[in-house]
């Protein structure tokens, strides 16, 4: 039985992964650190901002203090906000897919490694905020993907808000990276991948891989949960 669909955000709903990459390099430049785009996609895309900076700190022996780290996180958020205001675009097929789910009264949630203000800003600007009953963001979890914490928290919040008893096996998770797909699998949910960031052969943990969400029917989703 199909109970809910939980979405990743960056790379699934909005085409913003490149903007995150650019914002990180902007704030890292004074530290003489720069990521290549390939490195970002290979190693860092599935991480929260804090996890990414802590990993870069370790890899580059920057020895950042906690105060410096928090300052960099604020700078990155501001840099991203500036880029998003003129460059973020909703991925083709997403509005139609959301409308199909809403028309069939399928509850929707988001779990993302992005920050809540960033998610809210983009959704509100695109007129998509009302589709989602629950949003779980990086600030609300202790462990990021591939840990299942965020997806399990999303379904807990969804059940509390809607007074339902949806189980993990009734959840489809839509992701664009292997980290997110593994987190969905670890949560006992059904991972579905879109090839917005990686090719199909790099999305092996998925039960199904599609090029565009608008290619999916309600019958496809129900089959995944059967």
Image (cartoon, helix red, strand yellow):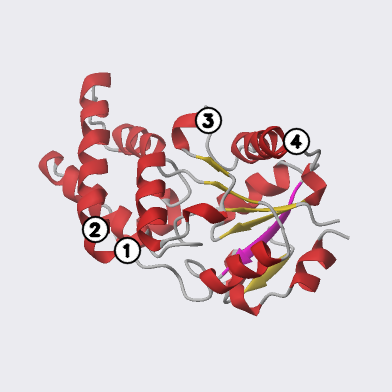
Please state the extent of the stretch shown in magenta in the rendering.
189-194
Q: Is residue 86 left or right of residue 39?
A: left
Near mark 3 (Cα within 10 A), the count class, few <14, some 14-19 or many ≥20, is some
Q: Gap in Å between the C-alphas at discs 2 and 3?
A: 26 Å
N-terminal-most mark, 4 or 2:
2
Q: Give the farthest residue toward the bottom.
A: 215
Residue 192 part of the magenta segment: yes
State which tag comes first along the sequence, 3 or 4.
3
Say whether disc 1 or disc 4 marks the residue closer to the N-terminus: 1
Mark nearest the camera among 1 and 4 is 4
Q: Which residue is mark 1?
A: 88
Q: Are marks 2 and 3 in contact (CB under 8 Å)?
A: no
Say which residue label 4 marks: 163
- The residue singled out by tag 2 in the image is 85
> Which residue is drawn at the image coordinates 35% and 32% (left, top)?
54
Mark-to-mark CA distance, 3 and 1:
25 Å
């Amino acid at each position: 039985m199909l109970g809910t669909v939980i979405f990743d955000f960056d790379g699934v709903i909005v085409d913003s992964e490149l903007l995150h990459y650019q914002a990180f390099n902007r704030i890292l430049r004074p530290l003489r650190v720069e990521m290549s785009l390939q490195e970002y996609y290979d190693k860092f895309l599935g991480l929260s901002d804090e996890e990414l900076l802590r990993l870069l700190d370790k890899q580059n022996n920057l020895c950042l203090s906690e105060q410096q780290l928090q300052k960099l996180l604020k700078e990155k958020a501001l840099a991203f906000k500036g880029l998003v205001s003129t460059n973020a675009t909703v991925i083709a097929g997403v509005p139609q897919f959301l409308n199909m789910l809403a028309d069939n009264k399928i509850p929707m949630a988001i779990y993302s490694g992005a920050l809540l203000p960033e998610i809210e800003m983009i959704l509100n600007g695109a007129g998509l905020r009302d589709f989602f009953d629950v949003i779980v963001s990086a600030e609300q979890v202790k462990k990021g993907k591939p840990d299942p914490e965020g997806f399990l928290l999303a379904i807990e919040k969804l059940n509390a808000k809607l007074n339902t008893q949806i189980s993990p096996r009734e959840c489809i998770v839509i992701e664009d990276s292997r980290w997110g797909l593994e987190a969905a699998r670890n949560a006992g949910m059904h991972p579905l991948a879109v090839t917005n960031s990686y090719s199909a052969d790099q999305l092996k943990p998925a039960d199904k891989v599609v090029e565009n969400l608008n290619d999916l029917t309600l019958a496809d989703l129900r089959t995944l949960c059967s």
